[in-house]
Amino acid sequence: MAVEEASIKQGPSRPQLSSAMRSSSYLKEHQQYRPPKQQFDAHFGIDTVVEDLQSARVSPSKPFTPFNGVPSKEDPPQIVEGVSHDFTHPNCAPARGSKSNRLIATLIYKSRAPRTANASPNPRGSSEFDLSASLAPTTDIESYPLEPPSAAAEPEPLDNLYGTYISPLCISSFLHLMSTFPLPSGDDEITSAHRCLDDPQHPFVVELTLSPTPSPAYLSLEDLRKHELINRFEREWNVDVILQPDNLWRRYPRLVVFDMDSTLITQEVIDLLAATITDPPDLAARVADITHRAMLGELEFDAAFRERVALLKGLPATFFEQLRPVLDVTEGVPKLLKALKRLGVKTAVLSGGFLPLTSWLAGELGIDHAHANEVVIDDSGRLTGEVKGTIVGKERKRELLLQIAKEEGVPLEQVVAVGDGANDLLMLDAAGLGVAWNAKPRVQMEASARLNGKSLLDLLHLFGFTSEDISSLVA
């Protein structure tokens, strides 16, 4: 009996962890795992414990070849732990001997510009005869390359469904739209990067960098800005899309030229003047009739202006001083001009209105150059109904822009022009960037950029400034 007990005791003992295999970690011991001290040290796992430190292995050892530090197809570099990075260069400086080919798309949500039905009056309220921003200037589809101005043609307002800001779906939809345009030869995909220029969670302004630009052989930038799909996207998502080449001049303007009426101020001065005068009582209606005929194309701007000034014959010249408190400066203009001055940017106002008011406003706002029409005043201090010199119309505005740029030594690529009417088109076209501000439909389609908000301070976003940058400039 004792022999049997001895033979039992001499049998194989249970496998157990030796002192050399133990550590101070309870979890490591009971999970039967110890990390290796060095990369190539043998480690004790479940196989070792079960086999009681014998040389036999339950599982065959895996072949291991240490990485020699030279990446190859067989040994590509990779991050074992942490975030996996893929290094691409869509926004880097171009390779030596080549040029960058990137497009900047600035999307600005019209948060404070509620949509209006096609039959509604102009939301800016400058004149009862103005076309609404949602109307086309003609009903002849052959002369307007967009959809007919009817309620049935308006797309569904997607911002009401997916967020009244620039939502991720809005950005995705725009990128998908841009991917449908052919790329230059040799490029098979488009890359993009985005920056929220204000709030990263619910942005109203987003800047997208696209590389490369759509093939200019298929679609020039000028035609791309007027493309029907871009226009439809703007109406669907209630945004303005501003497309600019990604170059040095976009970020560093040196001269900004403004129209005055319905741009720097919210009113049309001559209509304001007529509405304020009570004698004769029908003056406002007569001036409005001339304005209407000019909009219909029956009168050129010069002829219409001379005819309206003739109606003011006999008024005292001091009347301009009485109008100063009535002028309503557009929201954001004082801060914009302060920011431009701190950046060293020269400014000018070119007005088709009256020089006494334009010069006074330029002095109040700190604008460097002011040009407008001079009215003739007789010895008694009253208006004769005549205009002195050349009328500041569309041709004269362009000449003045070129003249000021030359005087200041500013290349046209660094000139920005802002206006709203047809008489601003030549000025907008001459500048490196022409911005249509709450403009008539024709001006919006022909200008290189369009803004339809309430604050002209949004102009700074087109230069790539964030809200933080703008706050620093206007502080």
Image: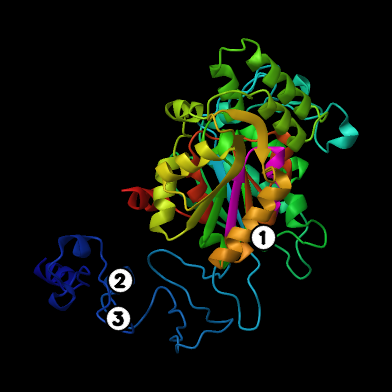
Nearer to us in this view, 237 or 175: 237
* Mark before the other along the chain sequence, 3 or 2: 2
Residue at the far right in the pictured view: 142
Segment colored magenta = 415-429
Asked which quadrant contains residue 331, the reply is: top left
User: Which numbered tag is attached to residue 190?
Assistant: 1
The residue that disc 2 covers is: 45
Q: CA distance from mark 1 to mark 3?
A: 60 Å
Give, as a three-letter code, the residue at label 2: Gly
Instruction: Please provide percent x and percent y for residue 47.
Output: 33, 71
Q: How is the image coloured?
A: rainbow
The answer to whether any part of residue 210 appears in the image is no
Q: CA distance from mark 2 to mark 1?
A: 50 Å
User: Which numbered tag is attached to residue 388?
Assistant: none
The answer to whether any part of residue 208 appears in the image is yes
Q: Secondary structure at mark 1?
A: loop
Nearer to us in this view, 85 or 462: 462
Instruction: Please provide percent x and percent y for residue 16.
Output: 19, 69
Q: Secondary structure at mark 3?
A: loop
Nearer to us in this view, 146 or 175: 146
Q: Residue at x 54, y 29 (%)?
A: 380
Nearer to us in this view, 97 or 322: 322
Instruction: Please provide percent x and percent y for residue 401.
Output: 63, 55
Answer few, some or many: residues within 10 Å of disc 2's Cα (few below 14, many 20 plus, some between 14 and 19).
Answer: few
User: Which numbered tag is attached to residue 54?
Assistant: 3
Give, as a three-letter code, the residue at label 1: Ile
Left or right placement of residue 318 versus residue 378 in this view: left
Q: Secondary structure at mark 2?
A: loop
